[in-house]
Image (cartoon, rainbow, N blue to C red):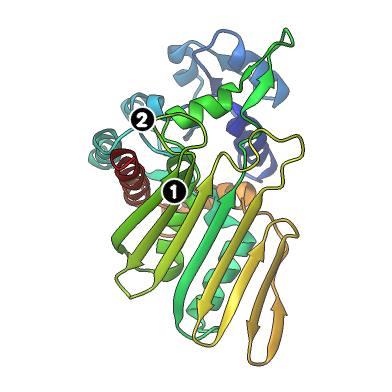
Amino acid sequence: MGAGSVADFGHAPAIRAVDGLELAAVYDPTPGKAATFAKNHSSPLGTDDLAAFFAAGFDAVTIASPAGAHLQNVVDCAKHRLPVLCEKPIAMDDAEAVKLVTHMASADLPLMIGFVYRFSPVASQIRDWIMEGKIGEVRSLRLIYDWGLHGRYAPNAAGVWGENPVWQGRMQEGGPMVDCGVHFIDLARWWLDSEVVRQSVAAAWVADYEAPDHVYAHLDHANGVHTMVEMSFSYGHTVREPAPQFSYDIIGTGGTIRYDRSTWRLELRDGDGVVVGPSASEKGFHEMYRAWGNALRTGDFSEIPTGEDGLRATHIARSLTNEAIARR
């Protein structure tokens, strides 16, 4: 449900590539959009008719629509007794997010949140190293994603330049901490197996939206670890040749772990030297769908990010953003 850019570059190719899965149908309310998408991704049905979509007969639904549509999408899926994989951010506010999660829980239906960063071989290796104590006791995480969200301005079909609808839409949904920061918040909770108990925020407005477009979050976990998350949509958002910054740093009593996306290099440094980990993107769409397909087949959902994970990460991201707005 939802035939936008994330479905196009991430979800649909992964569904088609993973053994045991197929893209059975596509729905988007914009006339003609789902039909074109379905043709491009070899799906037998693309429709803007909701009844026709659910009549197609399938086993689970991916919700990749804008955040404001997620709750109604989930209600429709639950009505048809279908498990759901829902994109982040899961809703526009805490009240909607709680309704979404509790609706699936009360219907006793599986709900997976699309925290695709968890499934990258990079993130999995980092978790293994942390759990094995390879860098001693973890004391601090520094997680950075500064980029321009494909540019704030772009030409339309007529060649007239204006604000990029993608940039505009994601700022209206809550900005970088809500859109991308939820991934880092989820990774920190998952890597550390520890909840956030205190938080603070600082922010900057390069563009004049309600939400800040460059945000610094500081999170204290119950186990004493500190996580710093820096997120931006305005880092190079008006330049011809942007140079985004994406990195993970995990600092421990016995060493460090660092991932730099510009080189896809993952390395662990300790008293014995340097260990190089798997080279991979920060996203793991194929791995996520392998895990989701396996969970649907076996009924074991213990290894997937749950609605509760989505609820916690989204609440932290939105409350940080709202605090920054209130203090502007």
Q: Residues within 10 Å of mark 2 (few under 14, many from 20)?
A: many
Q: CB under 8 Å between callouts 2 and 1?
A: no
> In the rendered view, does 194 fall on the left or right side of 30?
left
Q: How many marks?
A: 2
Asked which secondary structure carries label 1, the reply is helix
Type of amino acid at the residue the image marks with label 1: Val
At horizontal 39% and vertical 30% (from top left) the residue drawn is 210
Where residue 24 appears, as percent x and y from the top left, is: 58, 27
Where residue 247 appears, as percent x and y from the top left, is: 61, 60
Q: Please say if 19 is above or below 126.
A: above
Where residue 269 appears, as percent x and y from the top left, is: 65, 82
The residue that mark 2 highlights is: 74
Q: Please say if 175 is above or below 177.
A: above
For residue 15, which quarter of the picture? Answer: top right
Q: Which mark is residue 124?
A: none
Q: Nearer the viewer, residue 31 or 231?
A: 231
Where residue 35 appears, as percent x and y from the top left, is: 63, 14
Mark 2 and mark 1: Cα distance apart in space: 20 Å
Find the residue positioned furthest to the bottom: 272
> Mark 2 or mark 1: which comes first in sequence?
2
The residue that mark 1 highlights is: 182
